[in-house]
Amino acid sequence: MLTRRVIACLDVDAGQVVKGVEFESLRRVGDPVEMAERYEREGADEIVFLDISASAEGRATVLDLVRRTSEQLFIPLTLGGGIRTKEDVAKALRAGADKVSINSSIVARPELLTECADLFGGQCMVASIDAKREGDCWRVYTHGGRNRTELEAVAWAKECARRGAGEILLTSIDRDGVRGGYDLALTRAVSRSVDIPVIASGGAGSVEHLVEGVQAGADAVLLAGILHDRLTTVGAIKSRLAAAGIPVRKLEAQCSI
């Protein structure tokens, strides 16, 4: 059985890690390079940098952070936020990112996902889906949760998989930063609809929430705030997942790379 991944997410703004609630009320929490190194030492399987400002100046800052961080890490590093073109993807990969996460640009032009998957390989293309519940379904939002689209999240996830995405980063806007747990119904619905890995995101407030996310079908669980605030560690999370019968990569195995 494949191991389930624990992914530490660092939202980056003006060169610093920030954290918010429902994509708003941002507060600064630390240096991204130092935090990425610390989470790798604790046993994180991957690191995600999300450039939440995504201006031209912000993009240059984040690419520099990617370069400096990738030189220190042995685990995969994903960059998302403000990726608009094939050239942006190429720059991110050249800077040292192993994967690139895209949301708004592939909603605007789905062909971009197909083109990038064909050019760079689906294994490095992550389709990021920010979803908010509307009745019995979930609506896709873009531009950091500000713009509502006509896309339904489960159907869009299927389309992204068809177009060559290697995995889905699935974030519940309703749950983001609230620490009440992932949207398990959303996670379950998308996981059952695609044959590529799904990363549950938005709402992790305890180790039990991570267990629930995996049991709902997620191949990986992404978290930020409870790590940033040192309410738990990656090591403690993996111990609890293992105790629940969920296979995880042990820290010793990672350190031997």
Image: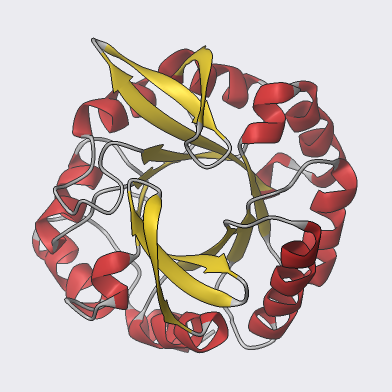
- In the depicted view, which residue is nearer to us: 237 or 223? 223
Percent x, y for residue 220?
Answer: 37, 51
State the quadrant of the C terminus: bottom right
User: Is 9 displayed left or right of 66 in the figure?
Assistant: left
Front residue (pair 242, 37)? 37
Residue 164 appears left or right of 77: right
The image shows residue 104, relative to residue 8, as above or below, that is above
Residue at (62% x, 77% y) in the render:
15
The location of residue 224, given as percent across then percent down, is 34, 65
Does residue 252 appear in the picture of this structure? Answer: yes
- Does residue 5 appear in this view? no
> Which color mode does the image show?
secondary structure
Give the vertical position of 206 relative to 65 (above or below). above
Q: Is residue 252 left or right of residue 207?
A: right
Query: Measured from the top left, where is residue 113 in percent x and y?
Result: 74, 31
Q: Position of residue 86 (x, y in %)?
A: 86, 43
Please report the residue visible at 28 percent of the width from the left and 54 percent of the height from the top: 177
Identify the residue at image location x=70%, y=65%: 97
* Circle count: 0
Tell which residue pokes out farthest to the front in this image.
Answer: 25
Residue 229 location, quadrant: bottom left
Residue at 52%, 42% (x, y): give it.
144
